[in-house]
Structure formats: structure tokens, C-alpha cells
Image (cartoon, rainbow, N blue to C red):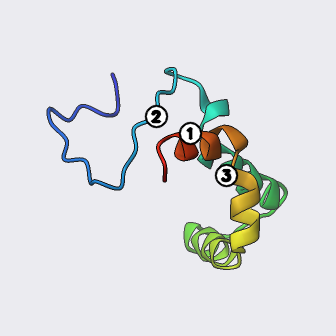
């Protein structure tokens, strides 16, 4: 069953629709952030869920804009934004 089942959407003016084939996580920039998160906690052990949540919160807080940009600002995305004059 699909996760997104909205019957209608209100799209803000600053949102740009970009086609992505279905089921292509390699084209989704956030997947690279998830990969970094998984790498950071690959061998970590936590006594409870709260401890894990706290560790992830600290990790996200410490993300630098430069790291996020390096993970998510792919040339094809920048090119698409340039074509739309953004």
C-alpha cells in the first residue's frame, strides 16, 4: 500500500516539482544523510530508546551546513534549479 495517499495537495510557490522514478532511493538526497547517520551509529549500543533518541538529536544538532550541502547538493539538482531560474 502506498504511503502517500492524499487526494489533493496545496503546493507552496517556492516548491519545485522534479520527476523521480518510483523506488529510486539513490536519486533522493536525504538517503545520503541517512547513510551517514547509520555509519555514525553502526556499532553503538544504547540501553534504551531514549538514549538512542538523545544521541541522534546530538548528531543532528552537530551537522554542519557544509556537510549537509556536500551530501545533498548534487550537480543535477543544482542544474535543475538553474534551469528554473532559482
2 vs 1, front mark: 1
1 vs 3, front mark: 1
In front of the other: 15 or 61? 15
- Residue 42 point in image, percent of width and height: 81, 54
Judged from the image, the secondary structure of the residue bearing numbered disc 2 is loop
Label 3 belongs to which residue?
A: 72
Residue at coordinates 54% horizontally, 46% vertically from top-left? 81
Q: Are marks 2 and 1 in contact (CB under 8 Å)?
A: yes
Quarter of the image that includes the N terminus = top left
Q: Are marks 3 and 2 in contact (CB under 8 Å)?
A: no
Residue at coordinates 34% horizontally, 33% vertically from top-left? 3
Q: Earlier in the sequence, mark 2 or mark 1?
A: 2
- Residue 44 point in image, percent of width and height: 80, 63
Label 1 belongs to which residue?
A: 80
How far apart in space, not on screen, are marks 1 and 3 (Cα)? 14 Å
Q: Earlier in the sequence, mark 3 or mark 2?
A: 2
Q: Which mark is residue 18?
A: 2
How far apart in space, not on screen, are marks 2 and 1 (Cα)? 8 Å
Judged from the image, the secondary structure of the residue bearing numbered disc 3 is helix
Q: Quadrant of residue 48?
A: bottom right
Amino acid at each position: 500500500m502506498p504511503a502517500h495517499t492524499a487526494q489533493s495537495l496545496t503546493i507552496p510557490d517556492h516548491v519545485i516539482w522534479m520527476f523521480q522514478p518510483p523506488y529510486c532511493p539513490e536519486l533522493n538526497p536525504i538517503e545520503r544523510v541517512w547513510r551517514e547517520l547509520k555509519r555514525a551509529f553502526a556499532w553503538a549500543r544504547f540501553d534504551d530508546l531514549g538514549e538512542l533518541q538523545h544521541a541522534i538529536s546530538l548528531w543532528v544538532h552537530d551537522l554542519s551546513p557544509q556537510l549537509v550541502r556536500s551530501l545533498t547538493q548534487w550537480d543535477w539538482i543544482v542544474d535543475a534549479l538553474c534551469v528554473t531560474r532559482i
